[in-house]
Image (tube, helix red, strand yellow):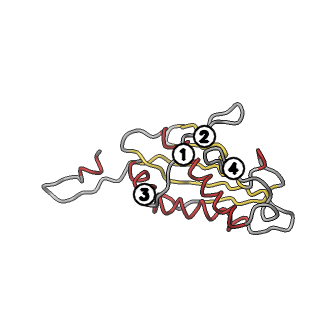
Amino acid sequence: MKEILQKLQDLSLTLPSPPTPLASYIPATRADNFIYVSGQLPISGDYMPTGRVPDVVSKEAATDASVTCFLNVLAAALPLLHENETLKLVQLQGFVQSAPDFYEQPSVIDGASTLAVQLLEENGKHARIAVGVNALPKNAPVEISCTFLVVPSKIRFLGRYRWFDKKSLK
């Protein structure tokens, strides 16, 4: 988990507070070594873009919104990790509130996919769904949910006399 937080800082990104559910569900749940994150909207503080892509929200703004969604996904998932665990993204499900003649949903969801690989590196490569829908909760332009596998954090062997990198053990 510490690697993820450090990479967020390196990218000048801030992890938001864990999202508040809009109804009777929880933001994320852990079952054995899997974490399932409920659909997250592009809420940042008190702001959320609204409207259909590209009629009201531009493709570029929707791509940025997918990044915000993924940050909210991480905010929901990270509290479920234990010491020396990290995340491997298995699948990302992306939904774009689209105009009937808009067909670029995959490029909108690429914002989240690209951030996943930047933050998780090899563990960020994932299967994905990117679909257009008629409407989303709260008129959001994008919604993302994810499935993660929980894996041990990286511990690097540094040679015979310095067994492990102390930074990776903290």
The residue singled out by tag 4 in the image is 48
Q: Residues within 10 Å of mark 1 (few under 14, many from 20)?
A: some
Where 62 falls versus 146 (above or below)? Answer: below
- In the picture of the structure, the residue carrying the numbered disc 2 is 19
Q: Pointer 3: what residue? A: 7
In the rendered image, residue 149, in percent from the top left (x then y), is placed at 51, 48
Tag 2's secondary structure?
loop
Residue 21 in which image quadrant? top right
Q: What distance separates the C-alpha of mark 4 from that of mark 3?
A: 24 Å
Label whose residue precedes the other's in the sequence (1 or 3)? 3
Say what secondary structure mark 3 lies in: helix
Question: Circle 4 — which element?
Answer: loop
- Sooner in the amino-acid sequence: mark 2 or mark 3: 3
Q: Say what secondary structure mark 1 lies in.
A: loop
Q: Are marks 1 and 3 in contact (CB under 8 Å)?
A: no
Q: Nearer the viewer, residue 120 or 53?
A: 53
Q: Amino acid at mark 3?
A: Lys
Left of 160 or right of it: where is 116? right
For the view shown, which residue lies furthest in the top direction? 24
Task: Specify the quadrant of the image occupied by residue 66.
Answer: bottom right
Residue furthest front in the image:
46
Q: What's the mark number on residue 16? A: 1
Are the residues flagged by discs 2 and 3 in contact, CB closer than 8 Å? Answer: no
Residue at horizontal 84 percent and vertical 54 percent from the top: 134
Residue furthest to the right in view is: 100
Q: Amino acid at mark 4?
A: Met
Q: Residue at x 43, y 55 (%)?
A: 9
Estimate the spatial distance between the alpha carbons at disc 2 and disc 3, rounded to whole Å. 21 Å
Residue plotted at (66% across, 62% down): 109
- The mark that comes first in sequence, 1 or 4, is 1
Residues tagged 1 and 2 counted as in contact (Cβ below 8 A): yes
